Amino acid sequence: MSAKAGNGFGILVTFCAMLLFWLLLSGIFDALHVGAGIICSAIVALISHDLLVAEKGEKVLSKSFKFFIYLWWELWQIILANFDVAYRVLHPKMPIDPVIIEFETTLRSDFALVTLANSITLTPGTITINIDPEKGKFQVHAIAQAPADALMVDKTMQSKVADVFMEQ
Amino acid sequence: MVELIVIILLAAGIFFMLTGAIGLLRFPDFYTRLHATGKCDTLGEVLIIAGLLIYHIFVYSPGADISVQLVPVKLLFLIVFIFLANPTGTHALMKAAYNTGLKPWKKGDARM
């Protein structure tokens, strides 16, 4: 939040997003409902614009584009994860051997850390336990050795997230 | 044709929810149970909502009022929020259990 101009831009973006959200959810377009929507969006935008629009807005477009591509890969990983869990649940011998692993990443920004943490939780056999934001350190519970190796050795997901947020 | 796709989506969703429930009962401790519920519930719910969404678009939407046309948008929002909230909630439970000192189950231990 350096200049006042950047502040106003953040408020405007938040206001437009909130108003769009209101209109989509209400679906009634008479003066009373739209007016109430404008007032509520304005209040929300004034109070909490810094939550939606972060302080530094560099390369937002290319980051969003890369994030969109990443989402499709992530969706595929989620489907794989579900078949993996279904296999482990329904197999008569339950092939599970839980381990807890730790690794460090190059990620620092909140949004990148949350993305990686949620991605780890949604992908096969791993759930995030703890994050240390200062060192980019992750503590992960893996249900067997194979998914743990995918995070420790291959590091596919870390490099993909780092690429999306340009934080190598 | 639409009905067939919707039925497949709903059946897949129910299958994954059921798997999550079986895993909750079969797995040996808190952490591994979270693996079953955290993942299967997310995809199960999303598949069921996707089925409802397609059904609504093809059956209710044509020629309907604007507020009825907007229902699929709301269902889309629901999918987005489930994808955001479900892993976050799973992580919060996991972290709370770990910080209170609950020991993870190792292979060969008795069930907890």
Image (cartoon, rainbow, N blue to C red):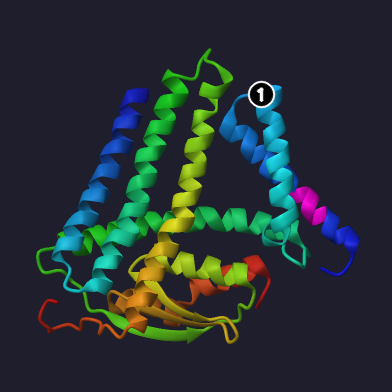
B35 and A10: which is toward the camera:
A10
User: In this picture, which residue range is highlighted in magenta?
Assistant: A9-14
Q: In this view, does A162 lie above or below B104?
A: above
Q: Label 1 belongs to which residue? A: A29
> Number of labelled discs?
1
Q: Residue A28: where, in percent of width, then height?
A: 61, 24
In the rendered image, residue A156 lying in the magenta stretch gets the answer no
SS label for mark 1: loop
Q: Which chain carries label 1?
A: A
In the rendered image, the quadrant that contains the C terminus of chain A is bottom right
Q: Residue A61: where, in percent of width, then height?
A: 74, 55
* Residue lying at 10% horizontally and 81% vertically, measured from the top left: B110
Secondary structure, magenta segment, majority class:
helix
Q: In this view, does B48 lie above or below B80?
A: above
Residue A63, by quadrant, is bottom right
* Residue lying at 51% horizontally and 22% vertically, measured from the top left: B68
Q: Residue A72: where, in percent of width, then height?
A: 52, 53
B48 and A78: which is toward the camera:
B48
In the rendered image, residue A10 lying in the magenta stretch gets the answer yes
Dot 1 crowding, Cα within 10 Å, few <14, some 14–19, many 20+: few
Q: In this view, does A11 lie above or below A140?
A: above
Q: Residue A109: where, in percent of width, then height?
A: 64, 74
Give the left or right position of residue A91, taking residue B67 as reference: left
* Residue lying at 67% horizontally and 61% vertically, measured from the top left: A51
Give the left or right position of residue B21, taking residue B54 as reference: left
Give the left or right position of residue B37, taking residue A39 as reference: left
In the rendered image, the quadrant that contains the N terminus of chain A is bottom right
Instruction: Give the residue furthest to the top.
Output: B63
Q: Is residue A2 above or below residue A132?
A: above
Callout 1, which amino acid? Phe
* Residue lying at 57% horizontally and 34% vertically, measured from the top left: A25
